[in-house]
């Protein structure tokens, strides 16, 4: 049952990737945005986890960041590291991201990413078990564009395994990012 659920969730990714070239209409696989993010956990009163990641965003519907569009849909891929004290793990994945532009320089952003976590047992205090390597990361936040190509973002994100494993600690983070639009 758990394997079937994983397959259902992962199968749309190649379809989304295949559609990434059609949104621009030029057959080009280059992303429309690249950037970096940093965040820290807000799960407990203690600051226990940090995360740093690089990301790229490919357009699917409209060109993400297009000032003329009110709604954009893109596919975001990311790779980075999660750490707590002396322990760390690779994290990477992909998923859809949507943006709604109520103003020309501010967007509301939300998304869902399927992620791989290389280490999911963190044994130093406080002990945390994320259950397994497959995680789901959802987020909501704001994107501000102070210049035509520069984007600054802030998001709240939640990572958990959706109860596909027995342990499901989950992790809530505040993330800030800096991106460049091509």
Image: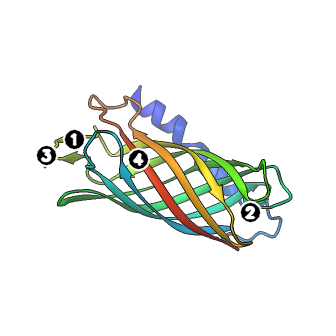
Query: Of tags 1 and 4, which is closer to the observer?
Result: 4
The residue lying at 69 percent from left, 64 percent from top is 145
Residue 66: percent from the left, percent from the top?
79, 61
Residue 82 place in picture, x, y as percent: 32, 57
Which residue, given by chain and number where applicable, does mark 3 sit on?
125
Confirm or deny contact between disc 4 and disc 2 (CB under 8 A).
Answer: no
Task: Indicate which label's residue lies in the foreground, 1 or 2.
Answer: 1
Query: Between disc 1 and disc 4, whose residue precedes?
Result: 1
Number of residues whose C-alpha sits closer than 10 Å to that of mark 4, classed few (under 14), some (14–19) or many (20 or more): many
Quarter location, residue 38: bottom left
Which label sits on residue 21? Answer: 2
Cα distance in 3D space between marks 3 and 1: 8 Å
Instruction: Return the residue nearer the eye: 116 or 51.
Output: 51
Q: Residues within 10 Å of mark 1 (few under 14, many from 20)?
A: some
Nearest-to-viewer mark from 3 and 1: 3
Give the residue pinned by disc 1: 128
| 140 relative position to 48: left or right | right
Quadrant of the snapshot with the N terminus: top left
């Amino acid at each position: 049952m758990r394997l079937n659920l994983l397959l259902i969730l992962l199968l749309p990714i190649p379809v989304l990737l295949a559609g990434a070239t059609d949104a621009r209409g030029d057959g080009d696989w280059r992303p429309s945005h690249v950037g970096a993010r940093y965040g820290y956990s807000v799960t407990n009163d203690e600051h226990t986890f940090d995360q740093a990641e690089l990301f790229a965003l490919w357009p699917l519907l409209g060109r993400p960041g297009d000032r003329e569009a009110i709604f954009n849909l893109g596919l975001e891929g990311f790779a980075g590291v999660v750490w707590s004290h002396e322990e760390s793990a690779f994290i990477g994945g992909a998923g859809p991201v949507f943006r709604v532009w109520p103003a020309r320089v501010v967007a509301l952003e939300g998304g869902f990413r399927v992620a791989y976590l290389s280490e999911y047992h963190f044994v130093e205090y406080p002990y945390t078990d994320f259950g397994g390597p497959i995680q789901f990361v959802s987020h909501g936040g704001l994107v501000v564009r102070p210049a035509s190509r520069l984007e600054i973002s802030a998001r709240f994100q939640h990572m958990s395994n959706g109860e596909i494993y027995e342990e499901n600690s989950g992790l809530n983070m505040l993330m800030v990012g800096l991106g460049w639009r091509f």
